[in-house]
Image (cartoon, rainbow, N blue to C red):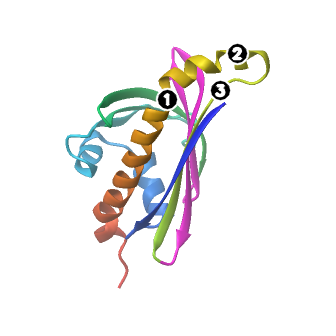
Amino acid sequence: MVTFETQVAVKGADGMALYAFLMNPTDADYQRWWPGTHLAYHALEPGPGRVGTRLYMDEYIGRRRVAMTAVVVAAEPGRRIVWQLEWIVRLPVWVRFALDDAPEGVRVTHTIAAGYRGFGAILDGVLRLILSPAFARDMDEHVRIEFPRLGLMLAPETATA
């Protein structure tokens, strides 16, 4: 199993604001979040109750252009979202967002976990080629930049008097 995780504090927003943004994707909002880096993010097929929604995302992680399709496999408003990546079939790759409200904003824990259980674990070496230490470093930097930017973007919408 390959796992890497980044925690980042996001000022100016709460878990519900981030949840609403991530669960209601539009290319225009995504591009406004990080112009030139975030290229596309939209629903391909909505799912019942949000779980089952298929998403498309296209962005740069470091110098790599990463385009992916994912299915929302778990969603708890204001608390967590779990995507499973797919390419023809669902892959053993999950992206998790844990959202924990704090007095100053929200703490986001972004986790990518990939791998097989049992006999299939012999294929984890292939996943390690794609999810390399260099990719993990680039993803960590990306998350540390992007989520504070989202807090700034959402701040006027979530600020209370």
The overriding secondary structure of the stretch rendered in magenta is strand
Residue segment shown in magenta: 77-103
Query: What is the crowding at mark 1: few (fewer than 14 residues within 10 Å), some, or many (at least 20)?
Result: few
In reply to whether residue 101 is colored magenta, the answer given is yes
The first of marks 1 and 3 along the sequence is 3
- Residue designated by label 3: 115
Residue at the location (67% across, 30% down)? 1
Q: Which quadrant of the structure image shows residue 100? A: bottom right
The answer to whether 57 is drawn above or below residue 79 in the figure is above
Residue at the location (30% across, 64% down)? 152
Q: Position of residue 81 (x, y in %)?
A: 56, 47
Q: Position of residue 90 (x, y in %)?
A: 58, 22
- Residue designated by label 1: 132
Q: Amino acid at mark 1?
A: Ser
- Residue designated by label 2: 122
Q: Amino acid at mark 2?
A: Ile
